[in-house]
Image (cartoon, rainbow, N blue to C red):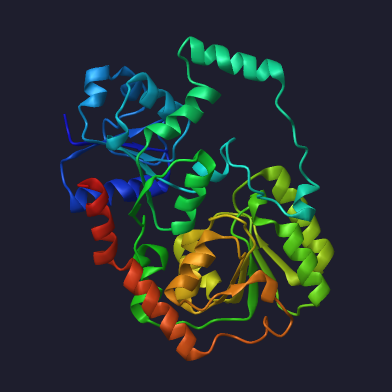
């Protein structure tokens, strides 16, 4: 058996994770997708959910490290069924696996967005059925919740995410610094190599059609400010129903000033779009849009983040010039960052996310 069992969602990021893991620590890891079908990885003989569930207890326990990318009910069932020792379990926190879990209780949505949500409370029958699943050792709510105590380490780029996990589960996880991607994966290669950053005046709002972006609350605030910027809003993926509402509201608030992006476009074209942006607002209460935010900061865009967001807190602690959404004003959305601020931001981001730095993060996790 190999040293590491690495569990992954079916995602383009997972392919990059596999490639870098093999680059820094070749041949020591088994990679398994916790899904029945795999769309993004074209490697022959890809291991999937049936392999994971088919491992015997002794086989499962033989791995030095079980490294989880995005913890979920299936992974929880695997950990509990095989009594994996906490000292061998590493949770690479992707954000949604904490903040969208049923155990996280802090607010995700602001006033206008909350109006779209019908909160359904779970009934006694639901919890009774979930309890029965626990008794007969099937995956479910209670096994899922218990499994968070079978984890000793959290790998994350953000101190705030680790603190949120500790608070949510009342458990003192050990923190291993870890970043998924290097800056050359976040910023288009041609732009990075040219070192030419020509920005426009468009105002980017959010990164996707997900409710955590709190688009409606941001739109309402911008309308009050009577901003003159073109409002560029990427909505190429997410909830179709939510995207429809945001499109209707965007045009209602801003008319021809609203410029949504509703289709996937090649990465190079997307980064050309980002160079039309001079300002960006990410009004998420939680850590999301890390790749977009890092790329925009590196390009020299003036970025506004929610003060509760762990990315905001982390960047401020490093000395990166970013702003709280509470600082939004018509004037602040007309004045670009100064050149020395842009250069300082690039220097900090490159220091944290250059190839050597990210390889070191991976090496530290894979051989801990």
Residue 89 in percent (x, y) is at: 32, 36
Q: Is residue 163 left or right of residue 213?
A: left
Residue 130 in percent (x, y) is at: 58, 18
Q: Is residue 340 left or right of residue 303?
A: left
User: Closer to the camera, 106 or 262?
Assistant: 106
Residue 227 in percent (x, y) is at: 76, 78
Q: Is residue 229 above or below residue 360?
A: below
Q: Residue at x 80, y 58 (%)?
A: 249
Q: Residue at x 41, y 29 (%)?
A: 75
Picture quadrant where residue 234 is located? bottom right
Picture quadrant where residue 239 is located? top right
Q: Is residue 288 above or below residue 218?
A: above
Q: Is residue 357 visible?
A: yes
Q: Is residue 20 above or below residue 355?
A: above
Quadrant of the image containing the N terminus: top left
Picture quadrant where residue 329 is located? bottom right
Q: Residue at x 47, y 28 (%)?
A: 146
Q: Is residue 269 visible?
A: no
Q: Residue at x 48, y 60 (%)?
A: 290
Q: How many marks?
A: 0
């Amino acid at each position: 058996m190999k040293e590491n069992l690495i569990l992954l969602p079916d995602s383009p990021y997972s392919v990059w994770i596999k490639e870098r893991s093999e680059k820094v620590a070749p041949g020591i890891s088994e990679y398994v997708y916790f899904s029945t079908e795999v769309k993004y990885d074209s490697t022959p003989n890809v291991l999937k959910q049936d392999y994971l569930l088919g491992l015997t207890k002794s086989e499962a326990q033989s791995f030095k490290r079980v490294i989880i990318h995005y913890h979920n009910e299936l992974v929880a069932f695997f950990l509990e069924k095989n009594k994996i020792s906490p000292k061998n379990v590493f949770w690479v926190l992707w954000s949604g696996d904490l903040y969208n879990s049923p155990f996280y209780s802090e607010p995700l949505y602001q006033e206008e967005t909350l109006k779209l949500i019908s909160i359904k409370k779970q009934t006694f029958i639901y919890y009774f059925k979930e309890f029965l699943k626990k008794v007969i050792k099937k995956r479910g709510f209670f096994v899922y919740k218990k499994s968070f105590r079978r984890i000793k380490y959290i790998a994350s780029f953000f101190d705030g995410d680790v603190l949120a996990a500790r608070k949510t589960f009342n458990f003192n996880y050990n923190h291993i610094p870890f970043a998924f991607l290097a800056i050359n994966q976040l910023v288009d290669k041609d732009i990075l190599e040219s070192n030419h950053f020509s920005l426009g005046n468009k105002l980017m709002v959010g990164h996707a059609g997900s409710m955590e972006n709190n688009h409606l609350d941001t739109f309402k605030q911008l309308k009050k400010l009577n901003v003159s910027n073109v409002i560029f809003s990427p909505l190429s993926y997410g909830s179709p129903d939510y995207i429809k509402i945001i499109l209707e509201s965007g045009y209602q608030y801003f008319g021809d000033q609203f410029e949504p992006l509703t289709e996937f476009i090649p990465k190079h074209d997307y980064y050309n779009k980002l160079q039309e942006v001079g300002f960006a607002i990410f009004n998420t209460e939680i850590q999301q849009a890390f790749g977009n935010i890092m790329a925009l900061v590196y390009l020299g865009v003036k970025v506004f983040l929610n003060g509760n967001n762990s990315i905001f807190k982390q960047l401020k602690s490093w000395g990166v010039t970013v702003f709280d959404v509470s600082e939004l004003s018509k004037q602040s959305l007309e004045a670009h960052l100064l050149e020395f601020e842009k250069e300082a931001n690039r220097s900090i981001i490159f220091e944290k996310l250059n190839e050597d730095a990210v390889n070191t993060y991976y090496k530290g996790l894979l051989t801990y």
